[in-house]
Image (cartoon, grey):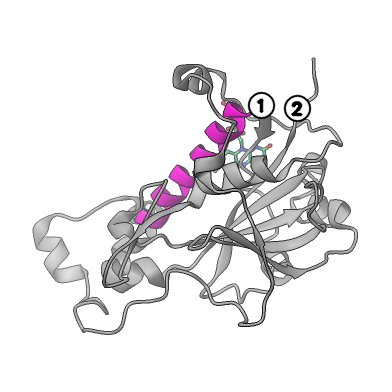
């Protein structure tokens, strides 16, 4: 257990020089892509651009004060503006660096490396076929990957029988691609990735609160089975956090 704590710490100068290896950036290796590729002929779904949002106008302090983990969702669908709002607030791209070696988003990230892809399991969004999707953040679009049979049951099973998870209208699944951060930070990357993930997850909490939706971060899930469902290799790409989102019952 104690050795696991080490990754949360940083280094003094003398240790840094001894322990931190030369990075691929220093070796002049090409930087990794900041958006996972998808097929040329793929039909993408347009999302609502942020300048057209009519939702989310609540006071910031109200949103922060009201945020809690919410595990009870109705059968109602989200609409496309709500889903677009959540994706924009968690991973929206504001600017790409000229040399394309980094990207500025609505959330901070160490070295602007943005080591995540957002996968969505959509159960109920108006006008969108249920299934597995990926957010194409560079153009603010959705990429359909496949249908998932019996998604509610499957997702509940894969989250150690937390039944409410499968009942979300949409289930966010953040996938880490560690090399994006390792390229520069080598063994320092993993702490930074964990911190980056916290920012993304908190923005989902706050964005949900701002538009009267509910969410909860889910750290308990079956790693290998979840990775397999998302068709990722579990080594260079793997799930790091899950979060169902849904409409809240009126109490
Ligand atoms: C990294 C992380 C993992 C979590 N995993 C779960 C989980 O698997 N199941 C669950 O019901 N809640 C989970 N939670 C939610 C916490 O239980 C919750 O944030 C905590 O009890 C505080 O409550 P609050 O968010 O309402 O303030 C997780 C939260 C975080 C930040």
Choose top left, top right, bottom left or bottom right for residue 179: bottom left
Q: What x and y, as percent, mark residue 70?
A: 69, 29
Q: What x and y, as percent, mark residue 150?
A: 90, 58
In this rendering, would 229 be left or right of 6?
right
Asked if the residue under mark 1 is in contact with the one under mark 2, i.e. CB atoms within 8 Å, the reply is yes
Asked if ligand 1 lies within 8 A of label 2, the reply is no
The residue depicted at 9 percent of the width and 61 percent of the height is 14
Return the residue at label 1. Answer: 212
The residue depicted at 82 percent of the width and 66 percent of the height is 147
Q: What x and y, as percent, mark residue 143?
A: 66, 66
Badge 2 marks a residue whose secondary structure is loop
Give the mark nearest the N terminus, 2 or 1: 1
The residue depicted at 45 percent of the width and 18 percent of the height is 61
Q: Quadrant of the C terminus?
A: top right
Q: Which residues are magenta?
A: 191-212
Label disc, if present, on residue 248 of the rendered structure: 2
In this view, the residue in front, 163 or 175, is 175
């Amino acid at each position: 257990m104690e050795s696991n704590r080490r990754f949360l710490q940083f280094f003094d100068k003398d240790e840094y020089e001894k322990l931190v290896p030369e990075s691929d950036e220093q070796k002049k290796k090409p930087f990794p892509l900041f958006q996972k590729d998808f097929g040329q002929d793929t039909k993408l779904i347009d999302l609502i651009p942020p300048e057209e949002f009519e939702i989310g106008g609540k006071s910031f302090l109200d949103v922060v004060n009201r945020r809690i983990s919410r595990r009870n969702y109705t059968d109602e669908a989200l609409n496309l503006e709500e889903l677009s709002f959540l994706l924009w607030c968690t991973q929206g791209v504001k600017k790409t660096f000229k040399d394309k070696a980094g990207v500025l988003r609505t959330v901070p990230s160490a070295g602007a490396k943005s080591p995540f892809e957002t996968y969505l399991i959509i159960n109920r969004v108006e006008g969108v076929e249920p299934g597995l999707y990926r957010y194409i953040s560079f153009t603010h679009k959705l990429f359909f990957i496949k249908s998932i049979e019996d998604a509610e049951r499957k997702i509940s099973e894969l989250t150690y029988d937390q039944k409410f998870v499968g009942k979300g209208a949409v289930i966010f699944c953040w996938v880490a691609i560690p090399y994006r951060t390792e390229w520069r930070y080598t063994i320092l990357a993993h702490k930074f990735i964990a911190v980056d993930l916290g920012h993304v997850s908190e923005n989902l909490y706050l964005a949900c609160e701002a538009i009267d939706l509910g969410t909860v971060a889910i750290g308990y899930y079956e790693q290998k089975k979840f990775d397999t469902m998302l068709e990722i290799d579990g080594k260079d790409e793997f799930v790091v956090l899950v979060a169902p989102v849904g409409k809240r019952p009126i109490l």
